[in-house]
Image (cartoon, rainbow, N blue to C red):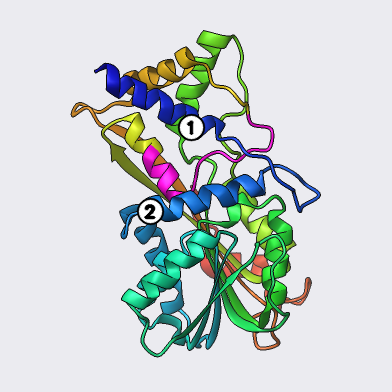
Amino acid sequence: MRRSVALCRRGLRSYCTDAGDGFQSSKLKIFDRHLKRVQRDRAAWLMKPKDSLVDTVAENLLDRLEDCKRTFPTALCMGGSMEAIRRLLRGRGGIEKLLMMDASCDMVKLCKDAEQQIPNDNIETSYIIGDEEYLPVKENSVDLVISCLGLHWTNDLPGAMIQCRLALKSDGLFLAAILGGETLKELRIACTVAQMEREGGISPRLSPLAQVRDAGNLLTRAGFTLPGVDVDEYTVRYSSALELIEHLRAMGETNALLQRSKVLKKDTALATAAIYESMFAAEDGTIPVTFQIIYMTGWREHHSQQKAKKRGSATVSFQDLQKQFGSGGGC
């Protein structure tokens, strides 16, 4: 019992206080991009060959390609869970050339090795080391940009999305999945209560995430047309807080706040684990964890796309509609 508690404490402390300072390329500094690269290097060695949560998100993102009548000969897949995207493509989108990009050297190597073991037939795949904040891709060069669980770690998310739009050819498609603000809400509550009890205040322990209401504005601000946003929530059950932390590390989703606290007290970490179990544990002893995924879809402008009519161009008034269909009872 003592050993499991110690492991849990170390896991929680690692999740909340991973160290490492590096050069920040963006003017808006929220995340330590150097640390995030280090975390993704580590995740490349810890990642499972198949992760049910990651695969589910990747499948749902790629399903959107099946709703498109057109094909996307050249595609850029960047950061996040790009290995799952490559593995699960299965001919969707009519992709002929696939560019895989990540800031982590080890993650790129992992994808290369996986491609050799399970190649994608009829797809020419190439690899590049690059940062989403400074996209090393020419303008008007790709038909499709895919980002699965990666963009939420950029310091300037609108700026990164603008670069994605510029990389697209006219009528090109942008697909992205990011973690939403309800992700890890149980852990956030447990951390907050534990800090208030043990330290008399709270400090940043978990990274801030975008809210659903912001996603549409992000797409519009980045200049995408026909923006689309939808949300899914997944509940994953773990045997303990330690297992949760290990999974987050394997996903490369541990804390990378630039202003993160360097030290998490031993008793605070223990209290967090205990509070989590006491507040949220199921009858079978497992602990539920919420992952909120925000899916975003946008297109680069093209003359063939649908456009909203100009204000005042309607030929039928609401009064005419009311006369035709009746006043109705209302709700």
Q: Residue at x 29, y 37 (%)?
A: 238
User: Is residue 251 depicted above or below 273 in this figure?
Assistant: below
Q: Is residue 331 magenta?
A: no
Relative image position of residue 256 (x, y in whole percent): 60, 41
Task: Identify the magenta region.
Answer: 246-260
Q: Is residue 251 magenta?
A: yes
Give the labeled residue for mark 2.
47
Q: Left or right: where does residue 139 sit relative to residue 91? A: right
Residue 178 in view here: yes
The mark found on residue 150 in the picture is none
Give the labeled residue for mark 1.
14
Name the magenta segment's main secondary structure: loop
- Most extreme residue toward the left is 284
State the CA–CA distance, disc 2 to disc 1: 17 Å
Relative image position of residue 217 (x, y in whole percent): 68, 56
User: Is residue 170 depicted above or below 45 in this figure?
Assistant: below
